[in-house]
Image (tube, rainbow, N blue to C red):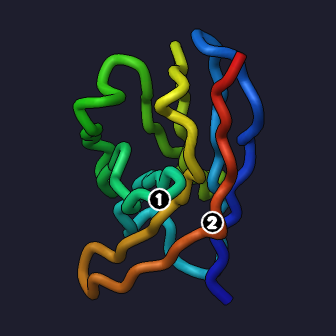
């Protein structure tokens, strides 16, 4: 069955770095647009960064220049490198897969990122 499993979250001090991973299985990973979303307490889930099947990327203004999304099709994994983390980056981070043709979507279970001194 389809699975997206996030890992790499945790507690980090302001200015620190984390790398999130999302391991996919059960679908043809290379045909899917992959993205990272985050949801802070009491707020809506918002997109952080996105990478197309061909490798084109985009990111939210709030993280541009600090966060980088990459993918490894051989490992069926998408990554989010997060640098210079700020307290406002604290949220649960989710991985999403969307099929380029059908539009089918799958979500991971989320991983908590807490930025605090």
Residue 17, quarter of picture = top right
Side of 5 relative to 101 (left or right): right
> Which residue is rendered at x = 30% and y = 30% of the image?
62
Q: Secondary structure at mark 1?
A: loop
Q: Which residue is mark 1?
A: 42
- Give the image location of residue 32, x and y in percent: 39, 67
Q: Is residue 35 above or below residue 13?
A: below
The answer to whether marks 2 and 1 mark residues whose Cβ atoms lie closer than 8 Å is no
Side of 24 relative to 59 (left or right): right
Residue 24 marker = 2
Q: Is residue 62 above or below residue 98?
A: above
> Which residue is rendered at x = 37% and y = 72% of the image?
98
Q: Quadrant of the C terminus?
A: top right
- Give the image location of residue 26, x and y in percent: 63, 81
Q: Is residue 79 above or below residue 99?
A: above
Of 60 and 78, the residue lying toward us = 60
Discs 2/1, front: 1
Report the Cα–Cα distance between label 2 and label 1: 28 Å
> Which residue is rendered at x = 52% and y = 59% of the image?
95
Rate crowding at label 2 as few (under 14), some (14 to 19) or many (20 or more) other CA atoms within 10 Å.
many
- Give the image location of residue 105, x and y in percent: 40, 80
């Amino acid at each position: 069955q389809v699975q997206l499993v996030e890992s790499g979250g945790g507690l980090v001090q302001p200015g620190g770095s984390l790398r999130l991973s999302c391991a996919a299985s059960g679908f043809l990973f290379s045909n899917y647009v992959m993205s990272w979303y985050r949801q802070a307490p009491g707020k809506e889930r918002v997109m952080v960064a996105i990478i197309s099947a061909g490798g084109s990327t985009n990111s939210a203004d709030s993280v541009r220049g600090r966060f980088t999304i990459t993918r490894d099709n051989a490992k069926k994994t998408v990554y989010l490198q997060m640098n210079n983390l700020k307290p406002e980056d604290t949220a649960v981070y989710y991985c999403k897969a969307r099929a380029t043709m059908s539009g089918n979507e799958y979500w991971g279970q989320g991983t908590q990122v807490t930025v605090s001194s």
